[in-house]
């Protein structure tokens, strides 16, 4: 099946160097013109540069997804410069945080606003644009495994990702009469495959100790560890949860006309991580066949190989 997004215009929020940037690159490689949004203008510009050096077309539209006027401004700019919007990917979110005993009200509020209000404002603005022009478009929200199951130390993240999941179903019902589809994609700790996120040793700069993420830093005698920090056996049945490129392939298909009747659904590309029973421990990494080699999209990047 030949997937083509030729002639389509996509807006991707939170187009930083990891998942958002990977999705933007994939949409461009499948033929779409991509508007890259991020609150950091440098991140938006870097996403554009990566797309362009791979032969795609893109523009940077920085802005705060929680600011109604800024959202209206960059949506109008995309429509004005590129002629319309066929695809919206709501990816902007705040990572990290702390557990329920230690999280601040300020961080919790900001995290929920970025993912919740940001997804709403962008979906409303782009959805109205699509409906008014008769565009039978596709809207994708990025969820997380933390939106479906519990994990210590990320209470704000878990809360807003859980909200994303039902927002998708409700928005799908609102927009179905207009032929506009709304779906979600659930990543599970993907391995970055953007050379900008790798160190001299080829390893991701995001691979750092996660000892008690979000746990308390105090020395109160009642404190208990947030999570196990010792050696772990491989926990993913296929040996890897994949990369932003794997995510991009799936999202591109979700946004294509081949998926014309799919709405209100969630897609997971994670090597079987979410499907696994908690008591099941896969075989040792060396005993797993693993997936077929990655179909790379960053043809100019040094990580366009099977090592990720």
Image (cartoon, rainbow, N blue to C red):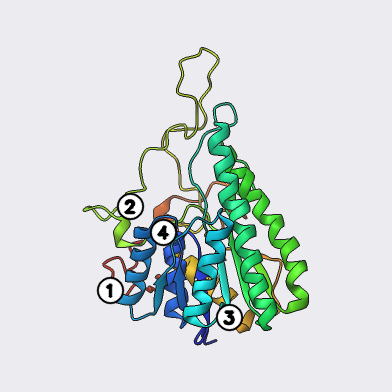
Q: Distance between the residues labelled 1 and 4?
A: 18 Å
Question: In which quadrant of the rendered image does the C terminus lie?
Answer: bottom left
Residue identifier under label 1: 300
Question: In which quadrant of the rendered image does the N terminus lie?
Answer: bottom right
Instruction: Name the outermost residue toward the top.
Output: 221
Crowding around mark 2 (Cα neighbors within 10 Å: few <14, some 14 to 19, many 20+) is some
Q: Circles 3 and 4: CB distance less than 8 Å?
A: no
Q: Which of marks 3 and 4 is in front?
A: 4
Q: Is residue 188 left or right of residue 204?
A: right
Q: What element carries label 1?
A: loop
Crowding around mark 4 (Cα neighbors within 10 Å: few <14, some 14 to 19, many 20+) is many
Q: Which of marks 1 and 2 is nearer the N terminus?
A: 2
Tell me: residue 252, above or below residue 98: below
Q: Is residue 235 left or right of residue 130?
A: left
Q: Circles 3 and 1: CB distance less than 8 Å?
A: no
Residue 123 falls in image quadrant: bottom right
Q: Nearer the viewer, mark 1 or mark 4?
A: 4
Q: In this view, does 267 lie to the left or right of 287?
A: right
Residue identifier under label 2: 204
Q: What mark, if any, has residue 16 been given in the picture?
A: 4
Locate residue 2, reporting x and y percent. Answer: 52, 87
């Amino acid at each position: 099946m030949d997937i083509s997004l030729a002639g389509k215009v996509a807006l991707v929020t939170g187009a930083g160097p990891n998942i958002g940037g990977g999705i933007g690159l994939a949409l461009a490689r499948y033929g779409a013109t991509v508007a890259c949004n991020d609150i950091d203008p440098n991140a938006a510009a870097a996403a554009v540069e990566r797309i362009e050096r791979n032969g795609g077309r893109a523009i940077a539209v920085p802005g705060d997804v929680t600011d109604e006027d800024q959202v209206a401004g960059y949506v109008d700019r995309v429509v004005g410069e590129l002629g319309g919007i066929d695809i919206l990917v709501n990816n902007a979110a705040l990572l990290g945080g702390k557990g329920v005993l230690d999280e601040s009200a300020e961080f919790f509020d900001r995290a929920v606003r970025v993912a919740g209000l940001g997804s709403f404002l962008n979906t409303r603005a782009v959805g109205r644009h699509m409906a008014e022009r008769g565009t039978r478009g596709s809207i994708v929200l990025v969820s997380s495994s933390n939106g479906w199951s519990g994990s210590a130390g990320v209470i704000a993240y878990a809360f807003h990702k859980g909200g994303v999941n039902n927002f998708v179903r409700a928005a799908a019902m609102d927009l179905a009469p207009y032929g506009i589809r709304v779906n979600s994609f659930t990543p599970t700790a993907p391995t970055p495959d953007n050379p900008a996120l790798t160190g001299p040793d080829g390893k991701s700069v995001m691979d750092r100790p996660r000892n008690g993420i979000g746990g308390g830093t105090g020395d109160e005698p009642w404190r208990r560890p947030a999570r196990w920090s010792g050696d772990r056996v491989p926990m993913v049945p296929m040996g890897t949860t994949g990369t932003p490129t794997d995510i991009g392939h799936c999202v591109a298909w979700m946004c294509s006309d081949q998926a014309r009747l799919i709405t209100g659904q969630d897609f997971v590309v994670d090597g079987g991580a979410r499907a696994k029973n908690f008591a099941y421990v896969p075989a040792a990494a060396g005993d797993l066949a693993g997936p077929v080699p990655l179909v790379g999209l960053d043809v100019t990047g040094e990580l366009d190989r099977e090592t990720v």
